[in-house]
Amino acid sequence: MVTDHIGLFAADHADYLAYVRDPRNGFASAPCAMNEGTELSIRTAPGSAVSS
């Protein structure tokens, strides 16, 4: 997942970022140096396939 404006709207993204940055929740996540802050999050947990 890609989340934009994490720096500009830090308070609005706080809960989301805490969740995806905690490895116990099955994500690897890190900020990227783009625009007002962009977060790249990748699901790493087994059985993490997403169905539509």
Image (cartoon, rainbow, N blue to C red):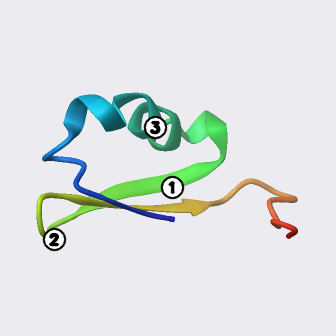
Q: Quadrant of residue 17?
A: top left
Q: Do the residues labelled 3 and 1 touch (CB within 8 Å)?
A: no
Question: Callout 1: helix, strand or loop?
Answer: strand
Question: Callout 2: helix, strand or loop?
Answer: loop
Residue 48 relative to residue 21: left or right: right
How many other residues sit within 10 Å of disc 1, few (<14), some (14-19) or many (≥20)? Answer: some
Q: Tell me what residue is drawn at x 51 percent, y 34 percent.
A: 19
Q: Do the residues labelled 2 and 1 touch (CB within 8 Å)?
A: no
Residue 46 relative to residue 37: left or right: right
Q: Position of residue 5 (x, y in %)?
A: 22, 55
Q: Tell me what residue is drawn at x 15 percent, y 47 percent.
A: 7
Residue receiving disc 1: 28
Q: Nearer the viewer, mark 3 or mark 1?
A: 3
Q: Tell me what residue is drawn at x 46 percent, y 37 percent.
A: 16
State which tag comes first along the sequence, 3 or 1: 3
Q: What residue type is labelled 2?
A: Met
Residue receiving disc 2: 34
How many other residues sit within 10 Å of disc 2, few (<14), some (14-19) or many (≥20)? Answer: few
Q: Where is residue 29 in the image (x, y as percent from the top left)?
A: 43, 54
Q: What residue type is labelled 3?
A: Tyr
Q: In front here: 51 or 26? A: 51
Residue 45 relative to residue 27: left or right: right
Q: Tell me what residue is drawn at x 42 percent, y 32 percent.
A: 18
- What distance separates the C-alpha of mark 3 from that of mark 2? 19 Å
Residue receiving disc 3: 16
Q: Which of marks 2 and 1 is in front?
A: 2
